[in-house]
Structure formats: C-alpha cells, structure tokens
Amino acid sequence: MTLSAIDADLPELATRFAAGPQLFDPEAAAARLNDWLTELEPAAADGFRELFASTPKAQIVLQAIAEASPYLFDLVRADPPRALRLLRSDPDQQLTALIARTEAEILAASSEAAAMTILRRMKAEAALLIALCDIGDVWPVMRVTEALTDIAVTGVQQALRYQLRQEAARGRLQPPCTDFPEQGSGLVVLAMGKMGAGELNYSSDIDLIVFYDLEAPTLAPDIEPQPFFVRVTQAMARMLSQRTADGYVFRVDLRLRPDPASTQVAISTAAAMDYYEREGRTWERAAMIKARPCAGDAEAGERVIAEIAPFVWRKHLDFAALADVHDMKRQMQTFRGQTQIAVEGHNVKVGRGGIREIEFFAQTQQLIAGGRHRELRVRPTLTTLNILAASNWITPQARDELTAAYLFLRRVEHRLQMIADEQTHALPEDEATIERFARFLGFADRAAFAEQLLAHLNCVQGHYSKLFEADEVVDAASLPPVDYGAGPEDQRLAEHLVSLGFKKPAMVAETLRQWMAAEYRILRVDSTRRAFLEFVPTLVEGLARAEQPDNAVIAFDRLLQELHRGGRLVALLSQNKELVALVALVLSAAPRLGDMVARQPQIMDGLIDPRFFGAMPDRRELSSRLAATLADAGSYEEFLDRLRLFGQESLFLIGTRILSGTVSTQQASIAFADVAEGIVDTVHGLVIDHFSAQHGRIKDQQTAILAMGRLGSREMTASSDLDLILIYDFDDEQPDSDGPRSLHGAQYFARFTQRLISAFTTRTNYGVLYEVDMRLRPSGRAGPVASRLDSFAEYQDHEAWTWEHMALTRARVISASPEFRAKIEGIIREILTRPRDRLVIANDVAEMRRAIAQEKGEDDIWDLKYAAGGLIDIDFIAQYLQLVHAAEMPDILSVGTVTVLDNAARLGVLPSSDADVLRGAARLYHNLTQILRLCVNEKFSPATAGEDLLRALVRAGDAPDFSSLEARVKETQAEVRAVFSALLQIES
C-alpha cells in the first residue's frame, strides 16, 4: 500500500492516538520493534512502516508495547495483519462487528473445540483493540470497562447458547427457537461485581451466579432440572476458562452463590430465595446491588432481580443491620500504615485510598438509603456518586474528587494488568520498575506519577474515613461520665457499650467490673493499677474499633490474666491509643502471639517503631538490627538470650503484619527466612569463636550451613523448624586442632555441630530459639551429625535416594566463606543436572506420595500440606520437573517452588494451563498456611475455630465468606491432584 492510498483512507484508530505512553529506553524499544518488523513478510512490514510514517504516535504506542507489555506484544506478533487491521479501523465499529461475527460463527460451529477457538480469537482481538484504545487515550476509562464487559457478556451468552443447542439436539431441551434455546428455559446467569456494573477490569475474573427454575418449562419430560443445569453450567464455565493453545476467554468464578461449599454450581431460584431470606448476609446484599442478568432466559432474569430486591433494599435499617454495616467497615480497616500511603508495592484496589474504598463508600450508602430512595438502586459506581451528590447525601466536591480518583486508579489498574495479562492490582515493589511503569502510563517519570497517585489515595482515604463520622467513637473527655465498674445491671453502662458497637453488653460490663476491681496479678502493683484504671475508658474505645469488639474484650482479658508484668504494656498502649484495636486483633486471632506477649511484653515495642508499617526489612537491615541488639552482650549466655528475644520480636512483628494485612504472605515467608538466616549466620560465627577458644582450630578448616526445606526455599512460616546440614573440610595432613583441649578431625566437627544445635535448642529464660532438624543429612539419623565435603559429594553421587535429591533442589548455603560456598553449590548443581530416567523418577515420586498419604492421611482438606492436591503435591511436581529436565534445561533450577513452575512453563515442560493452576494453588495454600501456623497450635477445625481466625482466613483467601473459601480450597485441591496424577501417569 502506498502513502497516498493511506492518506485517502486514513487509519481511524491510529490517527486518534493522543498523548500516549512515554518510552523508558527509546533506543531499545525502537530496536525491539524493528527487529520484529524485519522478521515479517516484506508486504506486512511495509504496511506497518507506511502507517508509522503517516502517524508517528502509532509507532510510539507499539514501541511502548514492545518495551513494557510482553502480553500485548505477543498479541501483535501472533497475527500482524490483525494488528494492522485494528490500527486502521474505527474501534467502536470494529468491536461491534467482532461481536456480531462471533455470534454468527458460534451458530455455525461444528464442535465444542471449534466454538472454544472462536471465543478465544474474539477475546484476543478484543484485548488488543481495547488496549490500543486505552494506551493511546482514544477511549475514556469507562468506555474501556464497558467494552471489556461487552466481550465478557458475549462470551458467556455464546458459550451458554452453544451448550443449550447441543442439549436441544440431544432431545433433552425443547426450546421454541433452537437459535435462541435459552428463551423460556428458566435458566438465569447473573453477572456480579464489576461485570454486573459494566465496570470490568482488563484481566478480570468474571463472577457469575447461575439460577434455574424448578419448573424448567422447556426441559424434556424425563429430564431432572438439577443435574441438567449443573452440567450445562460446568460446560459453559469450561468453555470460557479452560486454557488451550489459543489461550482462555475469561476465568469464571461461581463461588458467590449461596453457601458454595455445600451447593452445586447452579442452584434453584426457590432454594436461593429461601437462603437469602433466612441466612443472607450484608456482604451478599452489597454484592447483589450490582447483579445483572447477562445470559440465559432474560425474562426469568428480571423476575429473579425483582424477587431478590426486598432482600437487598430494606425499608428500615434495624440495629442488627447497622451493626453489620459497622462490621463491613471494620473488615476494610486493615492497618495498612496509619500515617503513610506508599507508592512502591501499593495495592490500588484494596490498599488504603484504593478502588475498593470508593466502591464501599458508594455501596454502603446505597444499602443504608436505597430501600426508601429508589433512585439509589443503580449499579455503576460513578452513577451512584452522582445520585448521592444530587440527593445531598454527599457534597459535589466529594463526588468530583472521588470520581477523579476512581478514573485515575482504574486506569492504573488496567495498565498494570496489560503487562502480563495478570489479575494484579499491586504496583511494583522497587523504584526502578515503578519508573518504567510510570512511563508506560504516560508520565514523565516516577515523581510525576507518585505525585498524582498519592494525591488521589490520600483524598479517597480522607472521604472514606469520614463515612461514619457520626458513628465514630468520640474522645473519652467528651463522653458523659459512665461507671465502668458498675457491672451488667447498670442500664446506663449497657446503653453506652451498645452505642460503642458491643453486641454483648452484659458480658463486657462484667469483664469491666473485674478490671475496675483490679482482680488480676499484674494490677497488684499500685503504679500499674492506677495507670490501668485511668486507661480503661480509652482501652474500651480502642477495643470497640476492633473487627469483633466483644471477642477483643475477651482476648484482652485473657492477656491480663496471663501477663507476668503489666506496667510496660499499659504504658505502651495508653501512649499509643491507635494500637489497641490492632493488639486486640492479634490477641483474639492468634493465641500463639498472645502467649508471647504475656511472657515478654517488651516484644511489642516494635509496634511503635515508625518503620513497622513500612517496607519489610531486607537481610542487610536485619543483620544491622541484630548486630545492634547483640553489641554489648556481656557473656555467651546473655548473647543467647538476646538472640532469642530478637527472634521472638521478629516473629511477633511479622505475624502482626500478616494479620493486619499490611504484608503479603510471600513477603512474610521471605521475612521469616531472612530472620532465620541472619540468626543462623550469627550463631554459626558465635559458636566458632566460643568453640575455638576451648578447642582451637584445625588447619584450613571450613564449615558451612546448608539450609534445606522451607528455610532453603524461603517459604517459612511462624512455626517452621530449621532443616540444616553442616558440611566441613580441613587439611588431612594436620587433622588435630591446636587448642588447649585438642580434638581430632571428624570428632572436632561432630562436637562443634552438637554445640551449634544446642545454641538453637537450649531453653533459656527467653525460651527456645528454633527447633533444629538435621535428618536430611546424608544417611539421616544413622549418619554422622556433620558431613565432610568429599563424603557429602560421594553420598549424593552414589548412595542418595530419589527423595534425597528432591530435597536437594531446595538446598541453599546460608553461612560459609565465599570459596567454600562455591564448592558446595558446584557439587549440588552437578548432582541436580545429571541425566535421569523419567520413568524411574516418576515412579519414585508417585510411590513416595502414596507412602506419605498412608502415614499422614490425605482426606482432611484443611491439612493444606498433606491433603490430596495440597502443598506436597505441588512441591513434588516442582521437584520432579527439576530432576528430569535439569540435565537439558538447567535454567529450570530454583529453590522456590513458584519460580520453578514459572521456569518450567517458560521452557515448555509444563503446560501453561497447569502452571496457572499450580501457581494459583501455591499462593492460596501459602496465604492460608501462614495464618494457620500463626494462629493454630493443633489441628485446624472450622467447627471449633473462633470468628476472628475464620475472618483472617477469609481475608487471606480473598473470599467473601468462609463457605466460599472452603469451596475454593476443595476445587483447588481437585485441580492440583488432577495435574499431579496426569503428569506422573503420563511419565510412568
């Protein structure tokens, strides 16, 4: 095509590109795009170059995609003519035509596989078109969300329609019109959340609820409704979410239905209405605000929405409902840094000042007023804000500021997700990556982006914090005098406690009476008792702000009973009142941490450190803090005591960050490992010095500590043991130590290792530092406690079992000289990269998994490690893949399970669909395991678990309630076990 031809028919989309992105490295971006163009057929390459010549901004947009978005660049490269066609199209007309073409092609599809391919090609083309319109500032943000929603609705409608046509062809369905078999079927698909409101984000899951009419008018007479509609729903979801060579359409989530742990994926309308009437919760009311029929029987869908309306829109807000609104607000308060909002790592969806707070701001007021003010019964967030302002529920300024913030944050969210088609909402963790992202978003640099981001986040947080201004607890000085020691019979005290948000005023009043009577050991000291009694009003206010105020009182009362010394704790909390609710959360959800506070109240000092809610300290900073802690220790025993106090304080602070939601579980795993690694290295050096003072040294002696298991993989929890191996070497010709109490060779290092273990495990006044497990050493318990380097290599080379090489994939040297470290790492790499028989390894792995199942059991879904499809399955898959592929693909090796899965998918030895399942499962299991290890000492049982623990698990699993979480765990374990079985069965 010539330039004159282009001028005659201007490329509509390309010519409409506005400001667009900034390039981080213009030369590299241009080179990457040009390299690709040289690989194309000459005609295709010329088409792009001519386009760039007439519309230079189109070239900048594609260079930015090449530089910043692997996902979008893959879409461009996968079909160059398609990319060129989109750039030359009118985007609105193109999207309409794409949807119409997809509907026609699905109607003519010869098989389910063909229909799935058509839907995936629609998604790929739409994803590229919509991204171009967003990146090039052609479409405003809400047009982007509308287009994404249109594609999702089309996908759901066409997948469902295809399945129903197949059922009609089999004679199970008798629709009046076979082209539209959903009509009159009584089957309803509700789009929930952002899809229901037309606000879908770029890489969003789609939340659906499927209802069916028990009468099912168009079913054949001999067909039962429930199994029929469940099967159709499952097939529809599979068509959309299953990954094929063409990718996927949308990830489908069906867990917002009533009681998902015990109901099928499709539920009868009658059963659903009965559930909502009897058990429906406030979050389900809020979810139903955005519910919209998107597929199935349209008339039946509108009837369902009308039938649910009385559940959602209450004419009167009784006290119980008001308390639920308070609970919703408390669940949002996750202590994400009380004075600062960060840029790096901030979650623009659920972080402070984020999208969720704007949505909550609007939805809460809809719940409160929508029953009597029908104009508030709308789905889109911005429409709601407009109506709230027009009705004087909020000021025009609040509407304008929240609207601007919403549009900005949604744009940030979309651009984050365009990078790799991941449903992420968190900004990059480091400044360099933020700098690149800021350019991709169109900013000149990080500083310009940060300025706007922080302004919007702080503005949202300001409006959000004022949402219940009239309901917030006022300062104690302004309250009418109340006798906190009057007991439950005092009506005034009871009314006061109810006004603060307590639901069990009699229980709270009785507990307060005991506090005021000073009936506790720690309150026998006059100064402590006086300080505590003065603190009680403030303490009660702080506990009232906890998620579960009544549970917080019980937990704090338990702490008072168990404290050995209380003056320090009372002083700390009375001077830092904002910590009371946080401490209440910790005490009620994690008795393990509460016990630590009761024994050593000083470990809470870290909570008032300004760094507490900031970025997690890295190994260098931890080493610096540890060195400062140990600097003036006067004796070996004091040294050990300070190490234990440092370890306990670190565990407490990391655990508190987990519970408060201010650190991801992955970051917590690394932090636990970094603390342990720093302590191990310090203890190693300490024992060397102390031992050599008694026994001297052997010529050229070297010792190294090899971390295995969860410490090796940096996936530790609050209760992890240390799996260690000690490796040594020395000069054979001079094997005796030179100290006053000389020891010979192997005996020297055996005694040294025992001293090392003792430093960790001896119980002092501050408890045990860590439990140490050295069973992973060569020959296990039957072998020596320490291994010489050549013996270690010989054993691994000739005697080690497959399971020992599996364990070796996590081995990491954490304390040694650089030269000795390099030798050990070389041996390990040589062992792991040797060729292996896949069949033998597959059989060994499968047999070991069966043996573990027989010993530990695998039927308890909440035994996340050993359950069928649990963590062990994922670990074994990662270890198996490394052992069988590392010889040809050494880049697969890593100590981290998720990194191994990423490497395996990238190298083509693990299907991307399986990698997605395993990565998601690993994240879910680690999230939940961190909470369980922190909060539960024995076997976890949902039936006996406290509400605070269940809430913490629900938050960690990103679920609306525990039933939904349990359903997700079951589904995930089934998916993981299927991958495990298929992989090993194929290989064996």
Image (cartoon, rainbow, N blue to C red):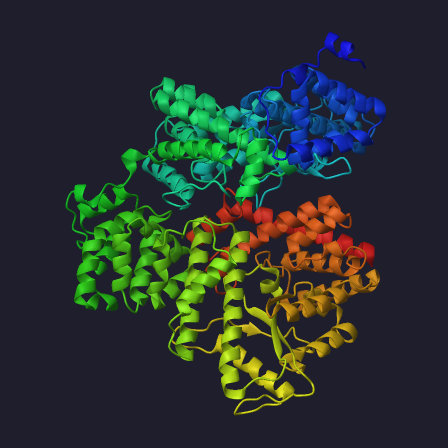
Instruction: Residue 670: name its quadrant.
Output: bottom right
Q: Nearer the viewer, residue 802 or 500?
A: 802
Q: x, y percentage for residue 498?
A: 27, 43
Q: Is residue 185 above or below residue 514?
A: above
* Placement of the C terminus among the 4 image quadrants: bottom right
Quarter of image, res 633: bottom left
Percent of width and height locating residue 763: 44, 77
Question: Is 380 rendered above or below residue 775?
Answer: above
> x, y (%) of residue 906?
73, 46
Taking the image as shown, residue 325 lies to the left or right of residue 862, namely: left
Relative side of 3 to 234, left or right: right
Direction from residue 247 to residue 208 in the image, left or right:
left
Image quarter (top left, top right, bottom left or bottom right) of the N terminus: top right
> At x 45% / y 62%, what residue is drawn?
624
Residue 657: where, in percent of width, then height?
44, 53
Considering every residue shown, the one lying at the far top of the view is 8
Give the mark count. 0
For image coordinates 61% across by 26% down, the residue present is 135
Whether residue 837 is visible: yes
For residue 806, what is the image quadrant? bottom right
Res. 219 in view: no
Residue farthest toward the bottom in the current orientation of the protein: 741
